[in-house]
Image: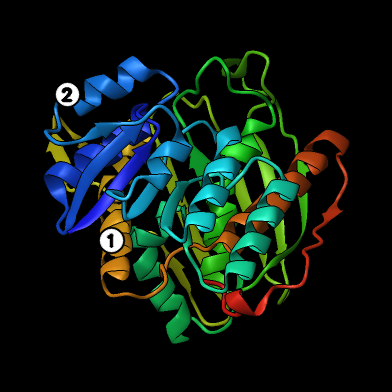
Amino acid sequence: MLKVGVIGTGMIGRDHIRRMTRVLAGVAVTAVTDVDVEAAKNVADRLPGTVVHGSGEELIADPGVDAVAICSWGPTHEQYVLAAIAAGKQVFCEKPLATTEEACRRIVQAEVAHGRRLVQVGYMRRYDAAYRALKAVVSSGTIGTPLMMHCAHRNPSVPAYYEKESAITDTAVHEIDMVRWLFGEEVTAVQVLVPKKSRNGDTLQDPLFFLLELAGGALIDVEISVNIRYGYDIRGEVIGENGTAALGDLSPVTVRSDGTLAVPIPTDWRQRFLQAYDVEIQEWIDSIAAGGPPLGPSAWDGYAAAVVSDAGVTALRTGQRVEVSLMPRPALYEVVS
């Protein structure tokens, strides 16, 4: 039984705790902590035997914690990931790995110095059944060499604290990681085009058109719409030399009535990717139980996503094409996971 300590008992932290205590196998939540101590206590009160710690560092040092799940505010991620590496404990870190390129670089360097992969970053699309099926088709060669991909990332609305740059750093960052994984290549340059502004966007520039260039020459376009009202809609289609492959209809039912055909649309990301989160955490647990390194998105993947995201923000602000410059990939991360 893997004993996991959870840092951060906000929405995503509580959801992962629910997942690990009610849905998944081979895991127990033995410790929690949060900047809001009362919130952590409220969670622990419903989990017999779970300890509440006063800080993330205390939780990581707890001998009753085998592995750590970091679900706290993004700017805290670096300190907790570094502490987990120093303690030699496996760590699952919700995205972002860290909030700056420099912080991500420090994490990569610390893990390389440790000599073994310990870090997995929470990019859950790699665990979604539809995306895995899409990758299988692309990798099989059925449609020939992939040349382009069209993506859409549509939110019905976003919180009040959402900023213009969040369309890249919080939203399109999922496409950034996904295309690196799907194509097995790094992003080499980005552009952001600004179409007519939606009246739903208030102070935001919404929507945006994000263009990524991959090392092998493929082009990826991402429509980012974060106030489109009708629902949470994720789309993707790969165009190959000999055919295309697209994400399928993700609704479990279609309704025919009153002369109409209706397909329900998810209302938010939790509904759309619920099962992907379950698979993600279960596979993380299983990889640790098997004694191997985590097989999911690595610290390098978190670093690369941060660099591309930063380039995207620069492109948004300047209107220019921005090249992406990554440091040499350490041997520990020879294959993009």
Question: Looking at numbered disc 1 in the image, what kind of residue is underneath it?
Answer: Ile
Residue 207 at x, y percent in the picture = 63, 32
Q: At 63% from the left edge and 55% from the top edge, which residue is drawn?
A: 107
Element marked by disc 1: helix
Left/right placement of residue 203 relative to residue 248 reads right
Cα distance, mark 2 to mark 1? 24 Å
Residue 77 at x, y percent in the picture = 55, 41
Residue 170 at x, y percent in the picture = 57, 37
Q: At 82% from the left edge and 41% from the top edge, which residue is drawn?
A: 314
Task: Count neighbours of disc 1 (C-alpha within 10 A) and say few if under 14, some if 14 to 19, many if 20 or more.
Answer: many
Q: Is residue 272 above or below residue 46?
A: below
Residues 100 and 136: in front is: 100
Element marked by disc 2: loop
Residues 136 and 81: in front is: 81
Residue behind mark 2: 45
Which numbered marker is on residue 285?
A: 1
Left/right placement of residue 206 relative to residue 57 reads right
Which numbered marker is on residue 316?
A: none
Q: At 39% from the left edge and 59% from the top edge, which residue is drawn?
A: 247
Q: Is residue 164 above or below residue 247?
A: above
- The quadrant of the picture occupied by the N terminus is bottom left
Residue 279 at x, y percent in the picture = 27, 58
Task: Kindly tell me whether residue 97 is visible in this rendering.
Answer: yes
Left/right placement of residue 40 relative to residue 110 reads left
Residue 197, image quadrant: top right
- Of the two numbered discs 2 and 1 on the same chain, state the one appearing first in sequence: 2
Task: Kindly tell me whether residue 263 is visible in this rendering.
Answer: no
Residues marked 2 and 1 touching at CB (< 8 Å): no
Question: Looking at numbered disc 2 in the image, what kind of residue is underneath it?
Answer: Asp
